[in-house]
Image: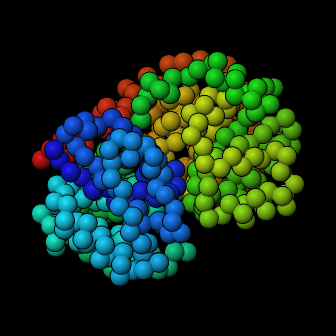
Amino acid sequence: MKKILQIGMTSNYGGIESFIMNVYRNIDRNKFQFDFINMETNGKALAYSDEIESMGGKIYKIPGRRENFLKNHNELKEIIRSNNYDFVHNNVLTWSYSDGISLPLKYSASKVIVHSHNSYMNPDMYARRLLNLVNRRFNYRNDIIRLSCSTGASKWLFRNRPAKVIPNGIDTSSYKFNPATRNEYRQKFKVKNKNVFLHVGRLSHQKNHEFLFQWFKEILKQDPNSILFLVGDGELRESLKKKVQEMKLSPYIKFLGIRSDVKKLMFMSDAFLFPSYYEGLGIVLIEAQATGLQCIASNNIEPEAKVTNQIKTIDITSSPANYVSMALESAANSKKFDRTNSYLKVKEAGYDISNTVNMLEEIYSK
C-alpha cells in the first residue's frame, strides 16, 4: 500500500479541501492511504475531519506556524521521519510554506509533490510575498513533482518549469439537476417566486464581495424581487456583514455560512455570480455548470473553468451597473433552460472525478 501525506487542508470548506476529499472518496483505499496534517490555530478541526476518520484517514495535529514556529517545524519533521511516506503531497497557493518540501527531501525517502491551486497572490500579504520569493528556490530542484489545477496556476507558481495539469474533478453524476430538490429548497427558503442569485466562496479579499454587493444593489433597482445567498466563511465575515447593513441590503443578502448542501442550493438558484480578483481554477464554477446553473464570472478566471456555454464573463474593473441586464437575463434563461444533461457536458470535458483519480493513481504508483 502506498502512503501519502496530504499537506494544505484547512478548516475552511474551500477549493483545495473539496479537491482532496473528492479524490479521497474515490481513490482505491486498499492501495492508497492518505494521512493529513492539521496546523490550524485555535484548536480548529480540519474540514471534513469526521469523514476523513470514518474512511480510515489519520489526522496529525501540530501547532500552527504563528502559534509556535519551532514546534510546527519539529513536529512535522518527526511525522515525516517516522512514517515512511511514499509521497508528501503539498497543496499550495504560494511557495510561502516550505517545510512540507524541504523536510521530506532532507529526512526521508518520500517523493515530494508541489500542487499549485492558485494563479495570483493578494498584494497586501507582504510577509507571505517575501517568503514566496525566498522559497521559490525550490522550483529549480529536479527532485519535486509539479502539479497544478490549470495552466494559469502552473505559470504562477512554476513559471517556465514543466507541470502536469490535474483537472479538479467532481462526481459529475451526483450534480445532475434535480427539479424536485429545486422546488423543495425554494419552498424551504421562501423564494418560490424570486430571482435567486448565489455566490459560493471564502469571505476574503480574493472573492471581491464589494463589487458583488454593488452589483446586486443595481440588480435590485430593476428587480426588487431578487435575493442573493452567500455560502462560505472567512476573515472578512463581520466587516462584510457590516457593509451589507450600511448599504441597507440586509433583507436581500443572506449569509448562510459553511454548508454541506451547496449542490442543492445550486439547484435552487437561478444564476451564479463570481466576480473574483483571481482563481486557480474555481472548482465551484465546475460544480455550478454541472447543475445547469447559469454563471457570470470575472474575466480573471482560468479558461479551463469554461467547460460549457453557461458561463459569461465580465470586466470587474468596469462599473457593476453595466452587468445588471446580463444577470437578470441569466436568471431568466436558467428557468427556461433544460438543466438535466449539463453534468454530462462537464464529464465530457474531463472533469469527472474518475479521470482525476486515474491521473493521480498513476502518479502515486510510480
**Relative depth, front residue between 5 and 231:** 5
Q: Looking at the image, which residue is at 16% across and 73% down?
A: 106
* The quarter of the displayed image where residue 204 is located: bottom right
Query: Which x, y percent locates residue 13?
Result: 52, 50
Q: Looking at the image, which residue is at 55% across and 75% down?
A: 124
**Relative depth, front residue between 285 and 232:** 232
Q: Is residue 163 left or right of residue 190?
A: left
**What colour scheme does the image use?**
rainbow
Q: Looking at the image, which residue is at 60% across and 31% down?
A: 264
Q: Is residue 92 left or right of residue 88?
A: right
Visible residue check, residue 246: yes
**Relative depth, front residue between 120 and 263:** 263
Visible residue check, residue 314: no
Query: Which x, y percent locates residue 248?
Result: 87, 54
Q: Looking at the image, which residue is at 48% across and 37% down?
A: 286
* The quarter of the displayed image where residue 171 is located: top left
User: Image height check: is 64 above or below 261?
Assistant: below
User: Image height check: is 187 above or below 107?
Assistant: above
User: Image height check: is 130 above or below 143?
Assistant: below
Quadrant for the N terminus in the image: top left
Total tally of numbered discs in the picture: 0
Q: Is residue 231 left or right of residue 136?
A: right
User: Image height check: is 299 above or below 208?
Assistant: above
Q: Is residue 289 left or right of residue 226?
A: left
Query: Which x, y percent locates residue 240?
Result: 72, 60
Query: Which x, y percent locates residue 50?
Result: 45, 46
* The quarter of the displayed image where residue 347 is located: top left
**Relative depth, front residue between 193 and 237:** 237
